[in-house]
Image: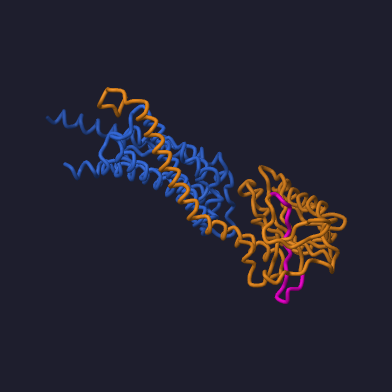
Chain colours: A orange, B blue
């Protein structure tokens, strides 16, 4: 209706060729941009993860990925795809500090992905960071914007399990104040931590026998990338 | 004449034929990602890049692309630019990319872009096509930005993340939720229609006055 100036029908071959060439050029362009941005993207992701681990585990300056294989936790350079992984956090002297546990579960709108720091010796959660969330802006997003709620995870006992209570009524070490107006989201965070803790508690090494920091990681967890 | 036409092609997209406020195109990103000014700008820039790039290529190859497969070719071209924009944003500004989420790949389906290829770029020389695309994309960016700024100021009490009001400001949360997008857009469209109505009225008055004088 618009373009045609010549009314003759081009041959099918020409049509096929045009689309094939367009597809080919497009494919090459996409591969080019994918290859050239991939290193930056993976580096960004690794950096984000490392920053999150350091944030949820105060005092940690080195980390390594740990997976549960053959009945014990072992350090790996790169976990297999879809293999559950936790991160061991170590201080300057390579002493074990705690685990950073990735966890995810349904929130109010979509999956909430979090990372929390856990000290098995004291059985307490020492930090929580929301990595992924589509909770309602202004309400549910307080699970990571409300400093009081996030701060509530700095010394939270997991025995017998974490309980979200009405704001201002926290009285036990395993209780945390839920956020007014974001009860579902804050309870979801607590439930996610409880479930992850229940799943992992048998698999984590006994306190005192955590996997050693492997020497090659000392330079700064380049292996993570 | 030549220069005027170029200017005209650029200006029309920004104001007279503004893709959002006048043509009411591209509503999906318009409503979805304008909950903050930064998101609006990122979306606007991505669309700008895709639209200008696609218009350039479509216009350059307009005699080579057979009309029977033109829409498929346009979509391939647009999709390629969108993928480039997607990966570039992911590499350079991961935080913004996370906020925009699925709406960057969805630029492919923005009817503003395909519309400009079909209506303009495939029929005009490259220079005009690029100017037209720049005008339209700037108009789109402007529209996104005004909506994003209004919604962020009212819904979060901030602009570009900088708090504007004191502690006592109670954010009008609904403005950054989806209904806020519809409300704001509705009010702006009302203004544009009112403006057009008044302008037509004014022009009629002028014409009537000229007739009575002459």
Note whether residue A180 is visible: no
Residue at left offset 71%, top offset 55%: A102
Give the extent of the magenta segment. Answer: A82-96
Q: Measured from the top left, where is residue A77 in percent x and y?
A: 68, 61
Residue lying at the far bottom in this picture: please name it: A93
Q: Measured from the top left, where is residue A210 in percent x and y?
A: 80, 66
Residue at left offset 46%, top offset 47%: A30
Say if A190 sits above or below B56 in the image: below
Q: Let me know if residue B64 is in the magenta part.
A: no
Left or right? Give the position of A33 relative to A2: right
Residue situated in front as seen by the camera: B60 or B169: B60
Left or right? Give the position of B42 relative to A150: left
Note whether residue B187 is visible: yes
Split into 4 quadrants, where in the image is the N terminus of chain B? top left
Left or right? Give the position of B7 relative to B197: left
Q: Measured from the top left, where is residue A225 in percent x and y?
A: 60, 61
Say if A1 sits above or below A143 in the image: above
Query: What is the quadrant of residue B9 in the picture?
Result: top left
Residue situated in front as seen by the camera: A10 or A160: A10
Query: What is the quadrant of residue B24 in the picture?
Result: top left
Left or right? Give the position of B117 relative to A6: right
Q: Let me know if residue A88 is in the magenta part.
A: yes
Split into 4 quadrants, where in the image is the C terminus of chain B? top left
How many numbered callouts?
0
């Amino acid at each position: 209706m618009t373009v045609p100036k010549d009314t003759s029908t081009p041959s099918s071959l020409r049509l096929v060729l045009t689309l094939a060439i367009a597809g080919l050029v497009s494919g090459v362009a996409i591969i080019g941009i994918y290859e050239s941005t991939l290193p930056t993207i993976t580096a960004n992701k690794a950096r984000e993860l490392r920053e999150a681990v350091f944030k949820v585990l105060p005092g940690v300056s080195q980390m390594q990925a740990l997976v549960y294989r053959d009945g014990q936790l072992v350090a790996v350079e790169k976990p297999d795809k879809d293999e559950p992984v936790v991160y061991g956090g170590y201080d300057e002297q390579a002493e074990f500090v705690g685990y950073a546990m990735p966890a995810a579960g349904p929130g109010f709108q979509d999956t909430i992905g979090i990372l929390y720091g856990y000290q098995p010796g004291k059985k307490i959660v020492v930090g929580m960071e929301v990595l992924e969330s589509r909770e309602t802006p202004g309400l549910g997003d307080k699970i990571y914007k409300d400093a009081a709620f996030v701060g509530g995870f700095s010394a939270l006992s997991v025995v017998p399990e974490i309980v979200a209570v009405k704001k201002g009524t926290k009285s036990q070490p395993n209780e945390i104040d839920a956020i007014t107006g974001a009860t579902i989201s804050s309870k979801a965070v607590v439930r996610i931590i409880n479930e992850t803790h229940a799943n992992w508690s048998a698999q984590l090494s006994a306190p005192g026998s955590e996997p050693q920091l492997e020497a090659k990681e000392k330079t700064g967890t380049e292996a993570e990338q | 004449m030549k220069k005027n036409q170029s200017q005209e092609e650029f200006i029309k997209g920004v104001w007279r034929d503004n893709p959002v406020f006048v043509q009411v195109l591209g509503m999906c990103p318009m409503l979805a990602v304008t909950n903050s000014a930064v998101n609006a700008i990122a979306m606007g820039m991505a669309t700008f890049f895709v639209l200008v790039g696609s218009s350039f290529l479509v216009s350059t190859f307009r005699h080579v692309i057979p009309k029977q497969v033109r829409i498929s070719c346009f979509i391939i071209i647009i999709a390629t630019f969108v993928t480039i924009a997607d990966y570039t944003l992911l590499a350079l500004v991961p935080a913004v990319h996370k906020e925009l989420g699925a709406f960057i790949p969805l630029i492919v389906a923005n009817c503003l872009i395909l519309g400009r290829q079909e209506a303009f770029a495939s029929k005009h020389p490259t220079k005009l096509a690029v100017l037209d695309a720049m005008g339209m994309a700037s108009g789109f960016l402007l529209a996104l930005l005004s909506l994003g700024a209004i919604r962020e100021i009212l819904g979060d009490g901030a602009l570009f993340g900088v708090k504007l009001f004191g502690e006592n400001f109670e954010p009008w949360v609904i403005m950054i939720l989806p209904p806020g997008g519809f409300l704001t857009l509705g009010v702006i469209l009302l203004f544009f229609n009112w403006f057009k109505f008044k302008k037509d009225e004014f022009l009629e008055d002028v014409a009537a006055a000229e007739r009575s004088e002459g």
